[in-house]
Image (spheres, rainbow, N blue to C red):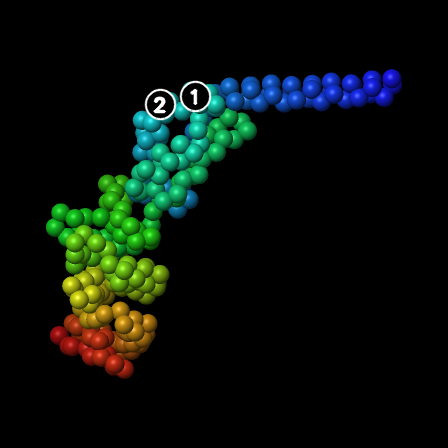
Amino acid sequence: MKRYIIYIKGLLLFAFVMFLYGFSSFRNQAHKIKDLNINFKNGDNLFITYETVDKLLIQKFDRLKSQPKENIFLKEVEETLLSNEMIAKAEVFLTVNGELDVVIKQKTPIARVNQGSEMYYIDSEGGKMPLSSNYSARVPIINGIYDAKISKELFQLVTLIYNDDFLKKQIISIKQTPKKEFFLQTRIGNQRIELGTLNKIDIKIKKLKAFYNKAIKDNTLGQYRKINLMYNKQVVATKN
């Protein structure tokens, strides 16, 4: 009999604990959102602002701060944020003190297309990213987009330029021909670089850097207007 009493007490204690947990969970879910915190992983007020994010969420969910927690579907909030073409990634979660935290990673532009009425960025994933009225990225200008398509060769080249400190500072524009040959324009010296196709691109870039290092050392860089990298084992530079 004593064993049964202990067993019953154990069940009652378990039921009481579960009741407290359920009641606490219910009260926690019914508690209204106290505040909305928006954070950017890669810089504040660049291509999309705090105000834009706040407006985007209000249009979809009305006033988030006054909503009970059970009405907030985190996945749906994330999907709403990702519908904005400036946003690459969004993480949304509720804190224990009743705040809704939003962490946003903006897309990274690596080049800009200016061709007739077509104006947009190429982002680091090879997609199209609209221009922003809030911020303008200092990236190379692209000409020669055909059929509104970003070729794999063009994406390869702009990625290479973006990830190379020397090229990133020096190249201001890129022209692509229908044959997938490329011509670059430099910032310092205003030279036209005839790159050709991306065949042996690593060797071509090494030749270009070697030429610039020597020309800068000899103080002769300003004497050249064109640099041809399409010949094997040499750089052909045309003087002004």
**Most foreground residue, 114 or 180:** 180
Residue 101 relative to residue 156: left or right: right
The numbered disc on residue 80 is none
Give the alpha-carbon distance from disc 1 to disc 2, as whole Å.
Answer: 9 Å
Q: Residues within 10 Å of mark 1 (few under 14, many from 20)?
A: some
Give the image location of residue 97, x and y in percent. Answer: 53, 27
* Quadrant in the picture for the C terminus: bottom left
CB-based contact (under 8 Å), mark 1 and mark 2: yes
Q: Which residue is mark 1?
A: 67
Q: In this view of the protein, which residue sits in the foreground, 195 or 153? A: 153
Residue beneath the point at 56% across and 20% down? 26
Where 49 sits versus 160, above or below? above
Q: Residue at x 23, y 75 (%)?
A: 229
Report the residue that reaches farthest toward the bottom. 233
The answer to whether 93 is drawn above or below residue 144 in the figure is above
Q: Quadrant of residue 24?
A: top right
Q: Is residue 193 visible?
A: no
* Residue at 35% across, 23% down: 62
The picture quadrant where one finds residue 238 is bottom left
Instruction: Identify the residue position indicated by label 2 in the image.
Output: 62
Residue 90, given in percent of the width and then of the height, sits at: 41, 40
Which amino acid type is shown beneath numbered disc 1? Gln
Q: Earlier in the sequence, mark 1 or mark 2?
A: 2
Can the viewer see residue 151 in this picture?
A: yes
Numbered disc 2: secondary structure = loop
Q: Amino acid at mark 2?
A: Asp
Q: Secondary structure under badge 1?
A: loop
- Residue for point 27% across, 60% down: 152
Residue 45, x across and y down, in percent: 34, 40
x, y percent for residue 67: 43, 21
